[in-house]
Image: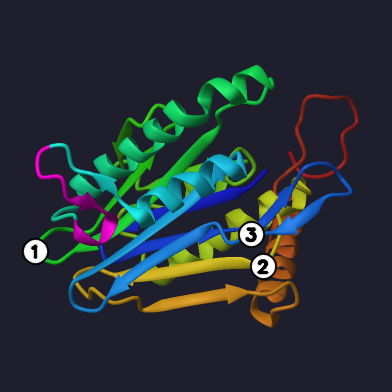
Amino acid sequence: MTYCVGILVRDGLVMIADTRTNAGIDNIAVFRKLKIISHSGQRVLAVATSGNLSVSQSVLSLLAEGLENPETGELDTLENQPTMFKAAQLIGRAVREVWRLDGASLEQMTARFDVQLLFGGQVAGGRLRLFMIYAAGNFIEVTPDTPYFQIGEHKYGKPILDRAVTYDTDLYDALKIGLISMDSTMRSNLGVGPPIDVLVLRKDALTPELEYRIEPNEPYFLDLRARWSQALRTAHMDIPRPPYGKNVPGDI
């Protein structure tokens, strides 16, 4: 299992991904799930992956090597696509190509062709964008009404994002909320765990403002976890108890 989140606010983009993979309780490993392509002043692209590790690695490897353009015969890669939309289409093509090559054999072994990707960034001359790409190779784009996407084990972190993130949220508040969302997911699912990879990209900067790996004992993240737990305890104590039973102590 995994958990990745992308948040696109007015001032920029935040992407966060855990690194834990497991095939049983005694087979846990660390794999980077957030790939960043950066050419300062030209483009910054980030791809976060979830699902079957062999499928997602095949997709990323195919994108790195390139897919032949049927019209020109040239190799298309993420580094030579003129727009974010074209790059998202290329990722969809790569997913479908891996399905063509491996889908039938996976089904024969009763393994799911399971992959989802978050793709965010900016190409010079275009706007900052964030897409979610499905196992069929189709995709959707984030909007100001719901300015985030999640993939993987998303249910534990979603309520926090729903309540706290808007398109006008400050960029580093978005990072903080995303990390609280990650902490809540880690607290409830052992299949999600550190290290945690983080990207912050400010709109039109065309160079990452922050690329950072949060290690298991990183002081700020430990403090965030403790403060969030205490804030939840304080909040529920401040809310009156339900008045539905008999002889309920406390305020009504």
Q: Secondary structure at mark 2?
A: loop
Q: Which mark is residue 125?
A: 1
Q: Nearer the viewer, residue 167 or 36?
A: 36
Cα–Cα gap, marks 3 and 2: 9 Å
Q: Which residue is mark 2?
A: 195
Disc 2 marks a residue whose amino acid type is Pro
Disc 3 marks a residue whose amino acid type is Phe
Whether the magenta-drawn stretch holds residue 84 is answered as no
Region rendered in magenta? 71-80
Cα–Cα gap, marks 2 and 1: 34 Å
Q: Is residue 164 visible?
A: no
Q: Nearer the viewer, residue 156 or 90?
A: 90
Q: Earlier in the sequence, mark 3 or mark 2?
A: 3
- Residue with the most extreme front position: 73
Disc 1 marks a residue whose amino acid type is Gly
Q: Is residue 246 visible?
A: yes
